[in-house]
Image (tube, helix red, strand yellow):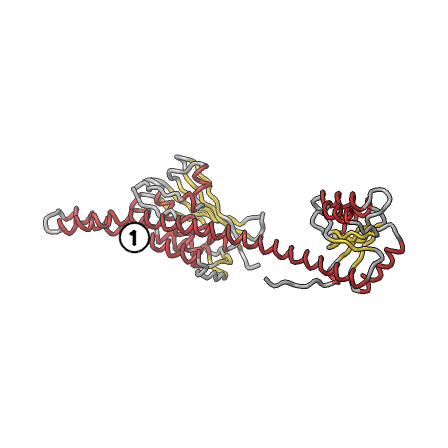
Amino acid sequence: MDVRQVNPNEQLILIIDDNSSNLSVINDYLAEQQFKVVIARNGESGFHRAKLTQPNLILLDVMMPGIDGFETCIQLKADRQTAHIPVIFMTALNDVANKVKGFQVGGVDYLTKPFQHEEVLARVKTHLNLQLQANQLQQKNGELQAMSAELVKLNADKDKFFAIMAHDMKSPFLPLLGFSELLALAVDTAPREQIKHMAQQIYQSSKNVYRLLENLLSWSQLQQGRMIYQPQEINLGKLISQNVSLFSDNALVKGIKLEHQVALELRVYADKDMVEMILRNLISNALKFTAADGQIGISATILSEPMGWVEVAVQDTGVGMSAEMCHKVFQLEHHVTTLGTAQEQGTGLGLMICQEMVVKHGGRIWVESEVGVGTTVKFTLALSHG
């Protein structure tokens, strides 16, 4: 740790003493050394000034009218706003009992009258340096605790991530292997329609595996900070239209009406690749959890509050979710994955990836859903840079 020495210009010293001549002597000397000095003439006003000015050090006379120095120190140490400030007693009392009492009530040192300037400066600088080092250690300790907590979280996330990989990579491979084996065995004897069905199942399973690997790769890159965020002005309306077209065949196979109501000229300031991945995950999820004859609609609304943002919504008439599940879908520790209406396998990472990418854009993402009615996922993007 880089330990700095105190800079007098940055240090405020509070002197509490009822003796004008003592005050004048020590105040003048400390001022010559470039220290900032505040004065109080009794214990009561000294206590209040300490709370108000938050000095780096207090020089406190023992013998004062009203509450004496010992009682003043007790009050200072009992208040959380002043308890941390080191107190050096100033006294003509040189007996051991008074010195012990001073340490017992919270003092850190003694200056004996009459003052020797060199001794005053040495003791003041010593305790200011000690206080500075204590503050630095406390700050470093706080940073280490924060780092430790972050490492614990990262380690837990890593373990959860590998558990998700082990579970989710196994699921889509089972039908892929099963239908491949059946196809190899039955290719010479099975009816053409059965072979076609098996080939379609192999293709669908392969797509699921590819989508899983794509999400896992994206998630890994996000966690390692390797996915570069490159925002620019993009045509959001055109991008949404392209992705609706991309999924039109999937929607047709399931008998789902997929459409959008977004002006083709709508532009936002965003990373095109990330926005496209967000849209693909959300449309794919909507298709997965919407049954035949259902509907999926994509809309975009320019917000008046906050200004300069657009709210994109992907709405379906699917199976819906409970309020509890809506809260968990963005949390790795709860990893929600459910079979779709046509038994499609889910990776469970799609919405979490969407969340991280939306956050990179400074926006937010949330889910509104009702079981048996449908789900709407909404996220926000900036209309322009700045």
The residue furthest front is 96
Q: Nearer the viewer, residue 200 or 239?
A: 200
Which residue is at a point 87% across and 50% down the rendered structure image? Answer: 18
User: Toward which corner of the image does residue 216 lie, by quadrant?
Assistant: bottom left
Quadrant position of residue 112: bottom right
Residue toward you, 247 or 322: 322
Residue 42: horizontal and vertical position, in percent? 84, 47
Task: Find the residue positioned furthest to the left.
Answer: 189
Q: Nearer the viewer, residue 238 or 69?
A: 69
Query: Label 1, on which residue?
Result: 207
Image quarter (top left, top right, bottom left or bottom right) of the C terminus: bottom right
Residue at image position (45%, 40%) is 326
Q: What amino acid type is highlighted by mark number 1? A: Lys
Residue at (84, 47) in percent of width and height: 63
Q: List the single residue furthest toward the top.
A: 372
Q: Mark 1 falls on what kind of element? A: helix
Residue 110 or residue 206, whichever sits in front: 110
Residue 299 location (% of width, % of height): 46, 47
- Measuring from the top left, give residue 121's x and y in whole percent: 77, 62
x, y percent for residue 196: 19, 49
Relative horizontal placement of residue 132, taking residue 377 as reference (left or right): right
Q: Residues within 10 Å of mark 1 (few under 14, many from 20)?
A: few
**Is residue 317 visible from the viewing direction of this image?**
yes
In this rendering, position of residue 190 left or right of residue 8: left
Q: How many marks?
A: 1
- In the picture, measured across the screen, residue 54 lies left or right of residue 262, that is right
Q: Quadrant of the N terminus?
A: bottom right
Q: From this view, report whether residue 4 is shown above or below residue 98.
A: below
Q: Is residue 381 visible?
A: no
